[in-house]
Image (cartoon, coloured by chain):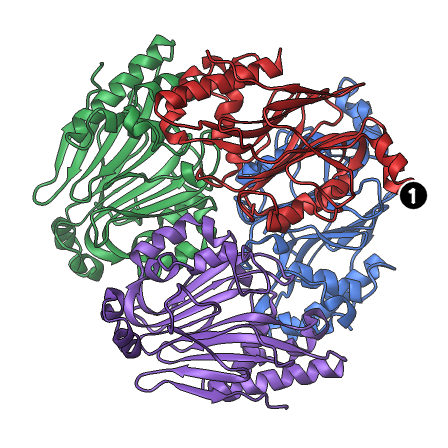
Chain colours: A red, B green, C blue, D purple
Amino acid sequence: MCRWLVYSGTPVLLQELLYRPKHSLIDQSLHSQLGAETTNGDGFGVGWYGEGQAPAVYKSTEPAWNDRNLRELATYVRAGLVFAHIRASTGTPVQQTNCHPFRHGKWLWMHNGSIAQFPDVKREIMLAVDPGLYTEIEGSTDTEAFFFLALTFGLEHDPPTAVERAVGFIEQVGRKRGIKHPMQMTVATSDGLKVWAFRYSSEGRSRSLFYSTHVATLRAQYPDNPMLHALSDETRLVVSEPLGDLAGAWNEVPESSYGVIQQGQDELKTFAPRPP
Amino acid sequence: MCRWLVYSGTPVLLQELLYRPKHSLIDQSLHSQLGAETTNGDGFGVGWYGEGQAPAVYKSTEPAWNDRNLRELATYVRAGLVFAHIRASTGTPVQQTNCHPFRHGKWLWMHNGSIAQFPDVKREIMLAVDPGLYTEIEGSTDTEAFFFLALTFGLEHDPPTAVERAVGFIEQVGRKRGIKHPMQMTVATSDGLKVWAFRYSSEGRSRSLFYSTHVATLRAQYPDNPMLHALSDETRLVVSEPLGDLAGAWNEVPESSYGVIQQGQDELKTFAPRPP
Amino acid sequence: MCRWLVYSGTPVLLQELLYRPKHSLIDQSLHSQLGAETTNGDGFGVGWYGEGQAPAVYKSTEPAWNDRNLRELATYVRAGLVFAHIRASTGTPVQQTNCHPFRHGKWLWMHNGSIAQFPDVKREIMLAVDPGLYTEIEGSTDTEAFFFLALTFGLEHDPPTAVERAVGFIEQVGRKRGIKHPMQMTVATSDGLKVWAFRYSSEGRSRSLFYSTHVATLRAQYPDNPMLHALSDETRLVVSEPLGDLAGAWNEVPESSYGVIQQGQDELKTFAPRPP
Amino acid sequence: MCRWLVYSGTPVLLQELLYRPKHSLIDQSLHSQLGAETTNGDGFGVGWYGEGQAPAVYKSTEPAWNDRNLRELATYVRAGLVFAHIRASTGTPVQQTNCHPFRHGKWLWMHNGSIAQFPDVKREIMLAVDPGLYTEIEGSTDTEAFFFLALTFGLEHDPPTAVERAVGFIEQVGRKRGIKHPMQMTVATSDGLKVWAFRYSSEGRSRSLFYSTHVATLRAQYPDNPMLHALSDETRLVVSEPLGDLAGAWNEVPESSYGVIQQGQDELKTFAPRPP
């Protein structure tokens, strides 16, 4: 499995997100505490939205803790919407085309979890992908297939419905083959304006996912913490594992639900797969 | 495009094949003379048959001229049937899963050339691959898709017919989409006992391919060449470009034909795609 | 040998420098026309000055033409002072610590050429490096040793004199060992404000080096070229090989000389090694 | 720190050593139980003695658990004397030239531990290396410097004395600089006939090291274990951490001692640094 982080808010240097926190994502690549695997050394990726509409990505097959170019990049890239992902492969090769986040136009997508027995269901999922999108698939992961299935089901127009339809489809394909729990996932996706973060698994025991407490609340609770004063009220993090150990800072995303990070009030809603 | 070499005969250290000749494959990776590209630096691979039935492979995304492990390996691996390939990508990513030779059971497969407009025809080709074989496909090249299509059409039982059917299928798919010359190829494949080497292109202007003159003939011609005395009469090379400059040593494989290297008399036959 | 480029002037996206020109540096990595080697595929590096005083670098051991992260980076990094280098190793390993440009504090340094018989003189050169600087040396190239020797001789205070002393020292060390032509170089260095570019070789047959014609002159000559109108009068390029084919745009740096790119009038002066 | 393994005995396929055991070295790369670091993902290397006198090596900067070429190699390389090492860098870059085992002629050398404050003492150690050996140093690790220092002090003629002199020298250099505990090490070296394995640290709390119990004893204890019957009486393993959990199979190498694996009776002796 993997670990990931979404940041949305006051633009910061990537190093503030990736290296600074006590239990940072880079630290998790060596010593994850809540992950299915303690080591997440099978490549990584970072995506962010800059001046243009399309996001930039940086991906590498090296363990994140060793990558010197990432350390450099973290000193000069400043962004207000960042996806970061460290990978622990569930079997597919370690290559850049298998690193998250995946990108299509202005969309980013990353995933922790897996489609159960993916080799057995891959062909049927790939056949369901829109032929016009099919040729954009570059790697061999379940995550990229899932992304393009969600795009096929309308991700760009209505992300929650598209993801619910994609998961419904995957569950149907899996169950036809006798797979008991076809889906295990925490997923984040964004168009550069909003972020959607999903937590779901067929068995109802999903990978961990946390969102940060509203900054205004934390600021009231910790009036002397300078970092909290530098962040806008809109700033929000969603993470596989809490960073740092500020009491009250992290809240678990409930089972079978998804959050929307956006201008104004964020939302937390119920997620239910839609069978085809 | 790419460059490749097949060696079949008296077991030799790989360094004799890969580094020793004047215009060796490693030299061609930097300075190809006959290739569509002068530099073949987008990864490489070597495959050979050892003690067991299944061949071993070594693949890397580095340029072959830089790979220190290949230089080592060439000093300790000795084999009598060797495939070697240096890659110049026609667009698909440089990653180990895209390096030739590809392997399935005891079969090896490598290719110079391309399926024209591969992104446009990939989905239809992949759909035609036997579902039981489909999940073995790891990379994203036209060559691997072509290999699994040939396996689907019976490569393991009748290689020439399977390749003729695969090419016939690819040409039909391409022409339906208005592609004038769907196929360009020199291909080698082996089961560890025989080698089949094909030269064909839809436009009748195929990539270069050469086979070595019978060793007994060369020995008579060059009675003082010690290397020729160390090789058995059965020894044969098939290459994209001649190695070295021994006059009379190399013969062009004719357009639309294939050779079979085997115990006893080798064969050279006509190749004709079979439409589905 | 290698190929390199320095850009100083109106801030531009790196892709304008690295990929856009007809005979761009990335193109030169595959097909150099004036280099000692036609292929420069042994890693590369880019360095640039951004907001802070210290430059950022991005280095990779992949051939530049294949690096997807470089292609991305070129779309979001915009800078007014850029060093870019593609490497053709003269024997030292292909690893990130051997990629140019090298960095020390706010200084960048890159080199085309070589110290003759470097293994024979390396120890004596390394011994001459200031012990306080010695531990910063990470790789094994002649270029990095040369850089730290120049730092030892005062590069940060008087670059031309420091380089002249470093070359004088290297020539003395080499000649003591009977090396006829100890030094072959084109070198660029910068502190983020000025750029110094040197062309020299002990035998008086130095690697090629060109500087661009003053933009105002080119603009008068080509009044309809929109690109020339977008560049400030201060904009200057120094390159191993001309980019593009604009007649009159490129001037050869004379043998045994160096140029200084700076605010106001640039300078071209004589270079003469200073024996210790 | 790192983990390593030496095997000496009945020739086996590398996969028997590297992948088969319950707590194999590859497993330790992800989950070391006794190491200073739980993850050893900063490259690895394998060295073995084959037909010729000089050993072959295979090194990679990838984590060992991901390396497909290693998995292949382990199926076709069979050897009776094997060094294997997985690296957790103590600061020097992850590059092939920093991977163990290091080689000089017929000698291999690998190390777990570190020279304390290596950047502070590196120059003095490098100066002490024989100038004729100096230029063979390719990487930047303390281990390689230590190896060439031991070679300088006569490793090829009397390994225990050479290592004692090298450690004595390193301790003197360190203590001059106020370093309390200059040396921490378990080291293995071989000339292809004998193996020497050292355990020592200046503070007397050395990294763990174990040797396997005499095969005849184990065979008597476990008469039904078929693997033990396939191994000659001379077969011996020395490892950073026990492989598997056969009771009685592993014995700790005592502090400040070294073992010699050789034809006939192996030896275990006291190790004492020799000041210069």
Residue D242 shown left or right of residue C246 in the figure:
left
Residue A35, placed above or below residue D249: above
Counting from the top left corner in percent of width and height, residue C41 is at 54, 45
Q: Chain of mark 1?
A: A
Which quadrant of the figure contains the N terminus of chain B? top left
Q: Is residue B113 visible?
A: no
Question: Is A244 on the left or on the right of B129, as rendered?
Answer: right
For the point 60% across and 67% down, the residue is: D141
Q: Secondary structure at mark 1?
A: loop
For this orientation, the residue located farthest to the left is B264
Image location (x, y in percent) of residue B257: 20, 28
Relative placement, left or right, of C46 versus C222 is: left
Residue beneath disc 1: A224
Looking at the picture, tell me which residue is in the foreground, B125 or A120: A120
Q: Nearer the viewer, residue D63 or C100?
A: D63
Could you tell me which quadrant the C terminus of chain B lies in? top left
Residue placed at 42% from the left, 60% from the top? D24
